[in-house]
Image: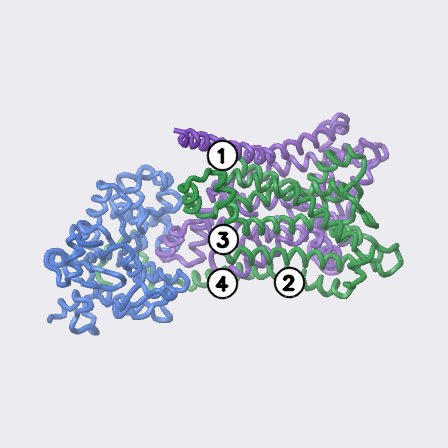
Chain colours: A purple, B green, C blue
Amino acid sequence: MDSAFGMRGLIARLRKGDEIAHLIALLFALTLGIITVLIAMELYRNSALSRAKFGWAFLATSIWDPVTEVFGAAPFIYGTLVTSAVALAIAVPLGVGAAVFLAELAPRRISDALTLLIELLAAVPSVVYGLIGVAVVVPVMRQHIEPALQRVAGSLPLFSGPAYGVGYLTAGIVLAIMIVPFIVSVLREILLAVPRDQREAALALGATRWESTWGVVLPYARLGVYGAVFLALGRALGETMAVTMVIGNRPQIAASLLAPGYSMAAVIANEFTEATGNMNLSALIEIGLVLFLLTMIINAFARLLILVTTRKGSVVA
Amino acid sequence: MEARAPVRGPNDVTPPAVTSLRRRAVNILMFSGTAVCAVATVSALFFILGYLLIQGGSSLSLSFFTNLPAPVGESGGGMANAMIGSAKLLVLAALIGVPLGFMAGLYVSEFASPISAFAVRYATDLLNGVPSIVIGIFAYTIVVLPMKHFSTLAGGIALGIMMVPVTVRGTEEFLRAVPGSLREASLALGAAQWMTIVRVVVPAASRGILTAIMLGLARVAGETAPLLFTALNNRYWSPGWNEPSASLPVMIFTYAIAPYEDWHRQAWAAALVLLGVVLTANVAARLLVRRGAVSTT
Amino acid sequence: MSPRACSYAGARCRRPDVAPVDSKISVRHLSLFYGEKQALRNISIDMAANQVTALIGPSGCGKSTFLRTLNRMNDIIPKVRIMGEVKLDGQNIYEPNVDVVALRRRIGMVFQRSNPFPKSIFDNVAYGIRVNRLAASRGDLAHRVEQSLRRAALWDEVKDRLRDSALALSGGQQQRLCIARALAVEPDLLLMDEPASALDPIATQRIEELIYELKREYTIVIVTHNMQQAARVSDVTAFFWLGELVEVGRTDTLFTNPREKLTDDYVTGRFG
């Protein structure tokens, strides 16, 4: 009976080993949620000064004056939203088109090759985009595109004012180039997840390839498409470097797309180390809090939409 | 056509024998249109690479890699400290991001119930979506403020947090790819679950997990925003972990927005080096995975 | 041998190159390769109009692959090579400048697992009509949808909820919806790939009754692994084995008195 005892004890110990392993792994997994909560808490805590002084008006005030210590986040929120809107307006059609091509219409080998290249594009650091933005996009905008826009539509308030080269439009364009590869890779996976027999049913009814894509595949993946767009929006909202280098860094709200502006991420990047005093720093951190909440809500929503479509957890993005 | 049962309407339209020209034209048009979108997107990559090569290639020299930054106006400055700084930051990032991410990924793949797995994956995705500058603020408040100065440590922690989601996803994906039959074989031989994981599953998935780590490092290597007020910058060497440190992305940013021509040239060179490293890591990671992420030997 | 008998003899036809006049489909020396692997070997068969031809055989022997060559659905699979000819109403559908899209409209397909679009019942049936521009007006469209649903014996069950999602229907109803969807574009030929394999016996019976009715007006080719079903539903049965057409003949003869020993073994259940 000795060996049986020994066996039982051994098995018991081994089983406990499994439980210990499970526990350890669980603890590590919990840290993910803990980190996110901690981030929120720290942002909240360290913005206490400015929250106490300005309250909700912080979101609507357009003044940003370190000297008199009056701070309002409105210009930055405006700039973030405008540049993101411009970026989406350009990147979504481009990205959806490219994703449809890669997932539905292109022959396999071409699709694989192009997909690889687009994923490499997604790996390019944002500061490199910023550099190209400053060196290439800004001059082109200032010398060619913005003057042309003004000739055509200069009477509209949207395109009024001098053409600096930097500004909302330029930032939006650089941002668009940055998020297109992101949209393409997320959307491509979503489209590939549409069951094959849906496509085949459409083709068997005498639909052309495009008609099957437009009438059956895209509607099937509708929620996932919205999810991909929202994810891209979340990315655009938080993008710092490329925007900082080409937006002009002027804390104002301007109607014209050609005007220089500022974004939430950009002002934090530029002024954090030069903050004059605790109120200034607190205000910047409060902007960080707003940015955090905004992106968190949009991402949470977007991921749910994608989940519903792909039904397989997260999409690699 | 012989008699076929007509599903006919009051206004009879005989189906055409050939698909209408309009439908075929639309098909071709959309094919071309979407192809243009794809090609345009890809060409951006080539444009960026090409431009960097042209602008930065000429400024690359040995001194660029070995010298410290020179005072404004003097030539011969380099970015040696930035490269070492980036390397140190990556080491820290790996030390923090890899264990956390690996264990969390392990949990999701091996231990979690479907609901828990969903919860952890969702939390990972949410953390992934936090803007890098916000993570920079976080690292500032928990490291820089208490220490009362900027440091490599703070920067490393920020980058480490950013590495976690990538590592989690990669670990989970490659652990999941290990065939169930391997696990069952081990369990059937009497091994406990944890032993199966340690001795069978993880080794089988190791190559894939390594590539995921490599991709994660490549991604954080290019991050600038979280370093702006954690590791800050430094025009000299930064020994140890407690002092501000130069890094490649921050140098690029600083030099690019400065008004000095020499600094612009160095920014291009640095960007070329950074992009080269990042792209090489990405391509290498894909090649490694292509040959079979799960090694069964 | 009269020309009629020749059309049922398949590979054993003594005059293999003469396509009988009333043969709806005429396949000659059809071979199909997935990359290096050969899935269909030198198939030759005639199928007459307004009759139900059943394709039987063990799994993986090429029945479904063969079915899909009839409406060129294998074209969308990469690395597929097809040799030989398939004539529909005397015209080879694998000729270079054939309009595949128009061809597929003429041939309806029902899949093994019902695959309604995630749209309303009405929109499912209407999809093919809209895409092919068959309806002259909205009233015409509604009329055609109703006709298709009637022909698929589904109208009475769904007429009050046409706008409901198709996914809310039961499995059997969904499959009949897919049949209605296929009928809506006015095909002359119906291809059915194990249409009832995922359904319960009652639903299966309704599908079989439907096939029996439809045969009056359509030509039907049905793949089935259920020999009793083939016996119940078809006029002609073709037995496939390992990519080859072993025997084809009138259903009652094939099941009771087959020519080939292989057929006899399969039909009596000695293998497969």
Q: Chain of mark 4?
A: A
Q: Which mark is residue A109?
A: 4
Residue holding disc 3: B295
- Which residue: 47% across, 40% down? A308
Please say whether residue A156 is visible from this viewpoint.
no
Q: Earlier in the sequence, mark 2 or mark 3?
A: 2
In the displayed structure, would residue C57 be above or below residue A266? below
* Mark whose residue sits in front, 2 or 3: 3
Write down the quadrant of residue C21 in the picture: bottom left
Real-space CA distance between mark 2 and mark 1, rounded to the nearest whole angstrom: 51 Å
Residue B243 is situated, as x and y percent measured from the top left of the image, at 80, 42
- Which residue: 77% across, 32% down? B146
Residue holding disc 1: A18
Whether labels 4 and 2 share one chain = no
Residue holding disc 2: B46
Real-space CA distance between mark 2 and mark 3, rounded to the nearest whole angstrom: 34 Å
Q: Chain of mark 1?
A: A
Q: Are marks 3 and 1 in contact (CB under 8 Å)?
A: no
Which element is circle 2 on? helix
